[in-house]
Image (spheres, rainbow, N blue to C red):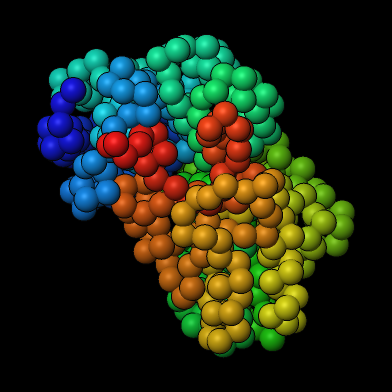
Amino acid sequence: MESFQERLEKVLRLGPALERNKGRIVDAAVRNLRFTVRDCAREVDVTIDRLKMFRQAAAILGNRVPLNGDRSRVSLMLSYNGSSWLNTAITSIYLVGNRVEVKFSSRGSEVMALTEEMYRPILGADVTFHAGSGKSFIEKSLRDPEVTAVVVFGFDENVLPYQDAVRRSGKKLVFEGPGQDPFIVFADADQELALEDLLAAKFMYSGQTCTAPKRIFIHRSIYDSFLERFVERVEGLGVGDPADEASDVTPLASDLAVQRIRAQLADGLARGATILTGGRIEGNLVHPTVVRDATDDMLGMREEVFGPVAFTTCFESEEEVLERARNHKYGLRASVFGGDAAARTAAALKGLDYCHPVGAYTFGKFGTVALNQRRAESWKGAFVTRAVGGYGHSGWIWETDGGAFRIKQGPKLLSVETSAPIS
């Protein structure tokens, strides 16, 4: 078995490979996933930087081995909302000595082929790629005696039915899922900072990220003025062809996401919400939309909104917004802006720093909570040196420990969860 340092050197060689193939990666992601040229190019740059950060993880990962020895394999199923960042998930699992079989979304076939082309000369047969369906991939992995862990990025409703099968298999399943992240702005917040972060985080990838702000709570005293400034900026976004460098918002990759947004907007209007800008859907192109006066029972506040639609609401007090933010099945990430009340709210929303056993799915806590901090800053090093993941139905681990099945929740490193300390 290769040493950690040998594996690290190989991972670091992927950075230059990504740089050489940047144009091809961007072109494939634009074609396959309809993300903008700018988002895809930025993602490659961020991924190259994150791969370098694995040097900082040596102290944590250098003394770890695969869960079941050097023949262990981990099955990794990835979501479609990304192209180059997926490398950080793959390499974090490989770095601790696992062989990895990777399943890309069917929408990302060109991205997968290009990734395989870059990996083969560097990592050989230690990382392989699966072209079948997600269902067959999970079921095959649970039967395969060499697979010690299955890691799935996806939708909670598709994975929850596998709990009994995972329990019977005795394997470990790590799930990373949706978010319906609260974005809370108190009256004393730095509104310019909040507006900048909201615009960038909400409309990056045309809203197709699990960590995009989804439930936007603005204090009543600044609600109207904040929305006026927000709408002005939203209306300045470029809408159109993913290949056009002037585009900020492009057609969505998922037909299902578009169908859900149609239903969410119709439900909101029927229940008394108002569309301030946008609301138009042409094919899979959802124009940037801002909704005001959303209530917590609306579909747009209860379900994940996977697109460029911002459901906003106002609140009166610290106690009110805390209760409303916590009353949800998803607990991935929260953003809070303001002074003392914001700090208390952020502390109350934050879960533990690392995943831990829970008696049942834990709702009302969040894996990452940013206080007066941009999304890019709070997510720096994710899956490399920063543990990320959520509570409730945003993420979990199923595992058998000492013969007993258990659930863990909270932020995690895929590298740590697919390995064990050297005994």
Tell me which corner region of the image, top left, top right, bottom left or bottom right, holds residue 27: top left
x and y, in percent, of residue 331 in the image? 61, 54
- Work out whether residue 278 or residue 82 is closer to the camera in this orientation and state it: 82
x and y, in percent, of residue 222 in the image? 65, 83
- In the picture, the quarter occupied by the C terminus is top left
With respect to residue 218, does 149 lie above or below?
above
Residue pictured at 35% horizontal, 21% vertical: 72
Left or right relative to 72: residue 269: right
Left or right relative to 90: residue 397: right
Can residue 81 be spotted in the picture?
Answer: yes
Tell me which corner region of the image, top left, top right, bottom left or bottom right, holds residue 25: top left
- Work out whether residue 18 or residue 125 is closer to the camera in this orientation and state it: 125
- In the picture, the quarter occupied by the N terminus is top left
x and y, in percent, of residue 315 in the image? 73, 76
With respect to residue 369, does 118 lie above or below?
above
Residue pictured at 56% horizontal, 73% vertical: 347
Residue pictured at 67% horizontal, 60% vertical: 364
Left or right relative to 323: residue 95: left
Left or right relative to 379: residue 276: right
x and y, in percent, of residue 406 in the image? 60, 38
Residue pictured at 31% horizontal, 47% vertical: 384
Can residue 130 be spotted in the picture?
Answer: no
